Image (tube, coloured by chain):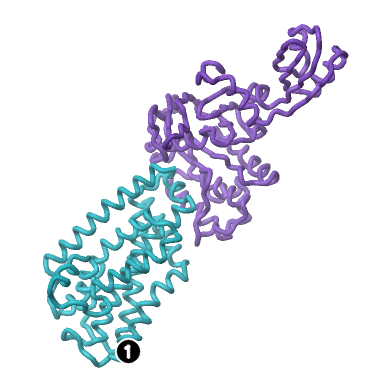
Amino acid sequence: MKGSKYTRFEILRTLRARRFLLFSLAFPLVLFFTVAGPNRHAHLDGISFPLYYMTGMAAWGTMVAVVSSGARVAGERQVGWTRQLKITPLKTSAYFLAKVLCGYLMALFSIAVLCMAGLALGVQLSVVQWLTMIGLLLVGLVPFAVLGILFGHVLKVDSLGPALGGSTSLLALLGGAYGPLATGGVFLALVKCLPSYWLVQAGKSALGTSGWPPAEAWIVIAVWTVALAGLARRAYERDTARV
Amino acid sequence: MALIDDHRGGIRLSSLTKSYGDVMAVRGIDVSISSGETVALLGPNGAGKTTTIDMLLGLARPDRGSVSVFGLSPSEAVKAGAVGGMLQTGQLIEYLSVRELVTMVASLYPRPLEVDEVLRMTGTDEVAARPASKLSGGQTQRVRFAVALVGDPDLLVLDEPTAALDVEGRRDFWTAMRGVAATGKTVLFATHYLEEADAYSDRVILMARGRIVADGPPTEIKARVGGRTIRATLPGVELAALRELHGVANADLRGDAVTLSCVDSDAALRELLVRFPAARDIEVRGAGLEEAFLELTAEDSNDDLEGETR
């Protein structure tokens, strides 16, 4: 109950952060039109290029949304607001949950914008395919939401921009969000250990080309989530102990 | 209404010790505060006030010793909504108005005060619609005070709430504070202004170098550190006669050199000149808090301050 009212104010704050919203939503959209626009009749991996690129950009856009939302903890730490919250009855878990929910809300905006852009370039999917794609993306985002909170505790506001931009771009690139990087060999085997690879695949799996994600996908997502949560917890506890 | 019924415990800090690296910030302090007391924690920068407050609020873990807040641990008391605080540093977050911010914090407590009432009490009703992150220093401090207060906590802790304010801002802040202290809350505030400790507390705990060097009613502490000192050369005088002078708290005589620690140096000086016209080389000095602390602690190279000063 208490947490839910708090979450409402957090969502209100997210919606009022116009520049943050605008930039988070605009870049994947611009990239989508720039790359997929001229190739709208091409095909890749057996699916239409705009559809392929739409899922890739959705993976990247939602990743940026949840990571940067969690990382906003850094700003609140820097101005001393998290310490203020620590002397209220708000539970730490409720504070983090609110950040994650705001990230997911942003992710949904990003998906909505990209789906509309996809429709504009002639992407056609059944309702079941749309919903499966969105659902699988949301599951694939869990480790990134935790990564954002970890960043929020180990980074200062100064270093947030480059760290977020660099890490999300690299993860998206290696995961294949901008296009397929590897089709086999050791490189693919390594890339398959990244959560971003499966986030990109989550969107594509739903399109019926490669079936549902294999057990390997769920394992990679779960392992990353647990490992990052452990690191985030340590960072949080160190932060609490400091004055 | 009180959230925790058993207030008999009050606040209890026992043998509290905390170091940061090589720096001993707090060196074993014992404090007992009854419910409803308004206590000033007075001391110069680096005295250990903020570290003590952080331990009281559960933001820092003591190396040794224990903290009890109404019979609970600090984190239990915080969870129960029994604590409100204004930390030494801290700004307000973006994208919320003052009213929204205070409402958000109110929603975290089991039995908060009316938000409008709190805005009025803290003098922030005029800026209620303004973005909380875009206020002047004085306004920010009053909104932070509203944030500390809106949960209707039994214990209110304020760490140097007026440190960044000008004289006018300070006066406004304490005017708001005075009304709150009258509602029966237990209030602990840290300050390095003797006047604030004197004017707004029932009791002053004086800290220096991580220890408590004095603990008592404001008048007593003021007499020890806040007055002026008169020094003069006066041959053949009795120490007892000097101690009888009006406005003198303590007198010291070494050879012909007289040192009078005064509560009211004006009265003392007038009487001194009338009764002892032979006094010469007269010097009146205001004892700054910092100097007073140094004097209080200088003699204690053997590290046994508490035993000596109580």
Q: Residue A76, located in which quarter of the rendered image?
A: bottom left
The location of residue A138, given as percent across then percent down, is: 26, 67
Outermost front residue? B255
Residues A63 and B83: in front is A63
Which residue is painted at 76% across and 21% down in the image?
B230
The location of residue A15, given as percent across then percent down, is: 44, 67
Question: Badge 1 local density, few (<14 within 10 Å), some, or many (20+)?
Answer: some
Which residue is painted at 36% across and 80% down in the image?
A29
Note whether residue B1 is visible: no
Kind of residue at disc 1: Gly
The location of residue B189, given as percent across then percent down, is: 56, 35
Residues A62 and B181: in front is A62
Q: Is residue A191 above or below residue B1?
A: below
Q: Is residue B219 left or right of residue A209?
A: right
Q: Is residue A126 above or below residue A238?
A: below
The cyan one among the chains is A
Parent chain of label 1: A
Note whether residue B52 is visible: yes
Q: Is residue B60 left or right of residue B250?
A: left
Q: Is residue B276 above or below residue B10?
A: above
Chain B pictured colour = purple
The location of residue B47, given as percent across then percent down, is: 54, 32
SS type, badge 1: loop
Identify residue for label 1: A37
Count of marks placed on residues: 1
Q: Is residue A30 above or below residue A96?
A: below
Q: Quadrant of the C terminus of chain B?
A: top right
Which residue is painted at 43% across and 74% down in the image?
A22
Residues B309 and A134: in front is B309
